[in-house]
Amino acid sequence: MVKTNYSKVEEILNKALKEEYKKELLDQAQIENDKKKQSEIEKSLPPKDRYKSRALNLIKKDISSLSRKAKHKMFEKLGIDKELIRKYIENPSDLSPQDWQEIKNIQKQIAAYKEEIGDSDDEFNQELIGDGRKKNINKRHNIRDGWLPLDVPAK
């Protein structure tokens, strides 16, 4: 039997893992840098504009916290236009008092929708857990699925 030298494979693997780790660190640093820039921009704004930008960031954060499917359903159910929200977030200084009233309404609608969907998410998760338990109740360890032991007759 031929001996295999794994040292080169280990070196390549270590190199790849280090590169991946560096990429993760760069991503984290970029996120932190973006947060600092955002806070500097907020500090340079007058208090009234700072409040407005925070309100818009909260809407953005609430929407991004939902799953893709939940977002799509939310926009359909509440009748909110994505492009309108995007326009509000990009240009908070150009908004009229009527726009701000609409933004407050959107915030209330999103909060109510998140409360509504939170209850159904718990039920859905419990259903998934129950299905997983039913599936694995007779699971044998270290044996491939579908393989029968030799001492048990086939059905």
Image (cartoon, grey):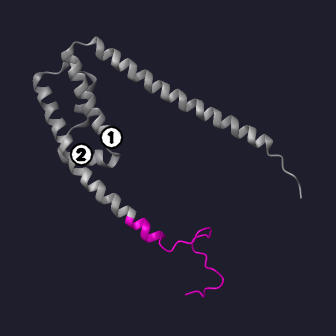
* Residue ID for mark 1: 65
Q: Which residues are magenta?
A: 130-155
Which amino acid lies under the numbered mark 1 shown in the image of this protein? Ser
Mark sitting on residue 120: none
Is 132 part of what is drawn in magenta?
A: yes
- Viewer-closest of 92 and 47: 47
Q: Position of residue 58 (x, y in %)?
A: 26, 31
Q: Position of residue 70 (x, y in %)?
A: 29, 48
Q: Residue at x 66, y 37 (%)?
A: 16
Q: Residue at x 29, y 11 (%)?
A: 44
Q: Earlier in the sequence, mark 2 or mark 1?
A: 1
Q: Is residue 154 visible?
A: yes
Majority SS type along the magenta span = loop
- Residue contact at pointers 2 and 1, CB within 8 angstroms: yes
Q: Residues within 10 Å of mark 1 (few under 14, many from 20)?
A: few
Which secondary structure lies at badge 2?
helix
